[in-house]
């Protein structure tokens, strides 16, 4: 009886420990989980011929959010949801803007993953060894002095410059055209319906006095 009780307690402890591990992992990757719905919307709302690209971009972005240290996961989360919001607001050509969003997220994810791989590779190299990757002899020592500068520029690029360029792209896509009361397709349909419903005047064709109707 005691053996059964001990086994039951041990199993419950294992289950509790496993549950705690899962909870801690979810909390540790809350930004990754929060970004998943945005990529789902980008994929399911994309045109059929764009969905594979959107899926690949989402996979790269989520992989970067998983592997690259902070604040990259937060930046990816903000970029993804900002893209979804911009597409929702745009009434002129949301498919074109969605394609820009997908491309921007994919490029940023590749840049983040590439920088992480590069950082991991050169982490164990001295300044002289790092300089020898790009030059030889005295030139290697000179180049080695710029290692910190390159790291600073890269961090600024990933944290500030590239995200700002992405947000500028979104704003350009939204404000490049004046706001419309409805989508261009609905406006064209409304104009055509009005032209077709207009009465004939002295046998004239409605298109002769309604210049915006084209068949």
Image (spheres, grey):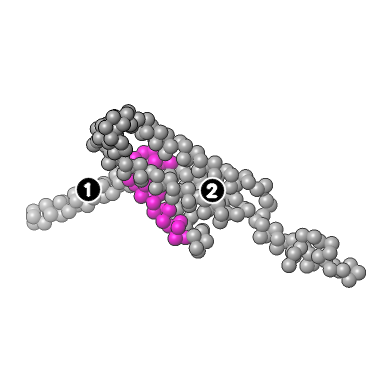
Separation of marks 1 and 2 at Cα, in angstroms:
39 Å
Q: Please state the horizontal and vertical placement of residue 39, each as a whole percent of the image.
A: 45, 53
Q: Residue 60 in magenta?
A: yes
Q: Residues within 10 Å of mark 2 (few under 14, many from 20)?
A: few
| Pointer 1 residue | 17
Q: Please state the horizontal and vertical placement of residue 155, each as a whole percent of the image.
A: 39, 35
* Picture quadrant where residue 206 is located: bottom right
Camera-nearest residue between 184 and 14? 184
Tally of numbered tags: 2
Over which residues does the magenta segment extend? 51-75
> In the image, is residue 102 above or below residue 215?
above
Question: Which residue is located at x 8 percent, y 53 percent?
Answer: 2
Camera-nearest residue between 136 and 204? 136
Dominant secondary-structure state across the stretch colored magenta:
helix
Question: Which residue is located at x 32 percent, y 45 percent?
Answer: 67
Sequence order check, earlier mark of 1 and 2: 1
Say left or right for 8 vs 159.
left
Identify the element where label 1 is drawn.
Answer: helix
Q: Quadrant of the N terminus?
A: bottom left
| Pointer 2 residue | 85
Q: Depth-wise, is mark 1 or mark 2 nearer the camera? A: 2
Q: Residue 53 in magenta?
A: yes
Q: Please state the horizontal and vertical placement of residue 139, each as a whole percent of the image.
A: 31, 31
User: Do tag 1 and tag 2 residues touch (Cβ < 8 Å)?
Assistant: no
């Amino acid at each position: 009886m005691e053996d059964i009780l001990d086994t039951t307690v041990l199993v419950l402890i294992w289950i509790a420990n496993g549950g705690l591990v899962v909870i801690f992992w979810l909390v540790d990757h809350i930004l990754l989980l929060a970004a998943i719905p945005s990529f789902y919307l980008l994929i399911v709302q994309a045109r059929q011929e764009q969905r594979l690209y959107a899926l690949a971009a989402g996979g790269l972005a989520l992989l970067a959010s998983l592997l690259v240290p902070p604040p990259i996961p937060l930046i990816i989360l903000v970029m993804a949801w900002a893209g979804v919001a911009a597409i929702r607001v745009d009434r002129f050509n949301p498919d074109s803007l969605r394609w820009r969003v997908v491309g921007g997220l994919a490029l940023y994810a590749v840049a983040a993953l590439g920088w992480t791989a590069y950082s991991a590779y050169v982490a164990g190299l001295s300044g002289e060894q790092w300089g020898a990757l790009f030059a030889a002899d005295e030139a290697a020592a000179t180049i080695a002095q710029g290692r910190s500068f390159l790291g600073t520029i890269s961090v600024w690029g990933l944290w500030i410059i590239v995200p700002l360029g992405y947000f500028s792209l979104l704003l350009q896509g939204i404000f490049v055209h004046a706001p419309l009361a409805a989508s261009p397709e609905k406006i064209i349909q409304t104009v055509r319906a009005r032209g077709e419903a207009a009465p004939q005047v002295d046998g004239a064709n409605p298109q002769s006095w309604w210049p915006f109707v084209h068949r």
